[in-house]
Image (spheres, grey):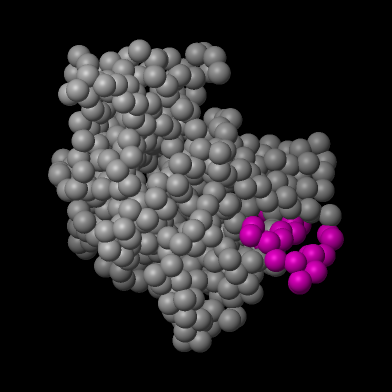
Amino acid sequence: MKKIAIALAATSILLAAAPLWAHHSFAAEFDPQKPIKLTGTVTEMEWINPHSWIHIDVKGPDGKVVNWMVEGGSPNALLRRGFTKASLPAGSEIVIEGYQAKDGSNRANGRDITFADGKRLFLGSTGTGSPDEKPEK
Amino acid sequence: MSNRFVAKASAVMFTVVPLAGVLAAVPAFAQSQGKAQTALFAKEAAGKASAAPRTPDGKPDLSGYFTTSTTVPFERPKDLGAKEFFTPEEAAAYAKRSLAAKAPTGPGTYADVHYDMAQFGLEKDQNKVSTGIRTSIVTGPEGRVPPVLPAARQRQVAKQAANRGHEFDGPENRGLAEQCIVWNGAPPMTAGGYNSNIQVSQGEGYVAITSEMIHDTRIIPTDGRPHVDPSIRLLLGDGRGHWEGDTLVVDTTNFSARNSFRGSDENLHVVERFSRPSADTLKYQFTVEDPTVWDKPWFGEMSIAKIDGPLFEYACTEGNYGMRNNLTGARADEAKGIKPNGRAALGE
């Protein structure tokens, strides 16, 4: 009987795991048809709620430098994870994979962000409903 | 913000409540809860001593920083039927699985959630969280919020229909959370997706409860004054507290229908009971009724775990680029002849 109850509990875990809501919708804001990969230099990180935003200069194929802004997690949670203002200083070389804003402007959400040497920054995002989402574990 | 502080905060906040410690207290709790799990709460014996610290005026001191995050689901998963309590072993297994579980990522499930909290925030297994032997926060045989009355359902459907196709017309068409107006600060208190932290402040004649999200603060007089005039409707409701022994009882009315809780209307009436069985825990019970929405009151109970402070600033409006992005996204879709889809339209 005990075993049955635990098995039942296991099936219902995933239902319980989903947060009540997110602040806003990936689907409304970013375009799943516009995956992007940006390599550039951090110019600023905005520690603002509800989401942090990272600004980077990206040199295009034509040599022209364009500034992009990329959405990250809530500063409060990042701070509690040990992320500080010193963690991503201006001048850092980073690579961002994410999805561009629906309106085609130079804004994106950051699904994955790594330093130029490949070291991961835990700003990476999954669970956004993006098309190449892979189930976790 | 000094590095010393950050190191301290992060070290503390990473701590998960040790399951063994929490569950060690389970047998006594199970016994007392199992005995008389009626719809109404048994009142605490007046004057009963508790382990809680006390304020200079002799009241139990409920103040401190806490999190409403818990492994106990709000409503009981249907496959658990009428099972209201786990055995301690089942509870331990459930809590362990719940902490390890990540929300599904497939379309239609986690698709509209902005980020995986394990990457962008603090998942339950990275944060402090309460556990318990209850199979749901909502108590009683069903463990679920009662069905909404037909007339109330009709009103809800009509309201949704009126906004259909206009979800992205402007900021006012978006939800209150997306507008940075109110989050989960109104009673009954429940965890949101992230930053589910509160601060309870207590002084003679008042108790205040601040939610980290959007800094919603409920200021609750405990001096016996009556509720404000019924013509005044408030997003967080109008709370009045009194002490029954070592339990703070808060009666909240005067809600605004704009800030609906699970379908509630402006006649929502919430009675909460706060006690502090130990320095590290608040026991939180609540009764919810709205006669124009549900045909009977319903009840909830949960543990609220103490955390190290402080709360951090959550100045939502100033940096709410998401609002602009949602609206410009909708304009871009419209230019292509695409209507916002239902899930995107929900936005929260």
* Quarter occupied by residue A104: top left
A117 magenta-colored: no
* Residue at 17 percent of width and 24 percent of height: A61
Q: Is residue B241 magenta?
A: yes
Which is more toward the observer, A82 or A93?
Answer: A93
Instruction: Please name whichever residue, B107 or A27, is drawn nearer the observer in this view of the structure.
Output: A27
Residue drawn 79% across and 54% down?
A: B222
Q: Is residue A107 above or below residue A88?
A: below
The quadrant of the picture occupied by the N terminus of chain A is: bottom left
Viewer can see residue B48:
no
Q: Is residue A114 left or right of residue B325?
A: left
The total of numbered circles placed on residues is 0
Q: How far across and how far down the image is residue B175, in percent?
A: 49, 59
The front one of A11 and A70 is A70
Q: Is residue A17 above or below residue B2?
A: below
Q: Quadrant of the C terminus of chain A?
A: top left
Q: Which residues are magenta?
A: B224-247
Whether residue B52 sits left or right of residue B295 in the image: it is: right
Residue furthest to the bottom in view is B151
Residue B209 percent coordinates (x, y): 65, 46
Residue drawn 33% across and 60% down?
B334
Q: Which percent across, then down, holds residue A16?
A: 33, 56
In the image, residue B229 sits, relative to residue B303, either above or below, namely below
- Visible residue check, residue A136: yes
Left or right of B252? Residue B222 is right
Q: Residue at x 36, y 56 (%)?
A: B330
Closest to the observer: B70 or A18? Answer: A18
- Give the prevailing secondary structure in the magenta stretch: loop
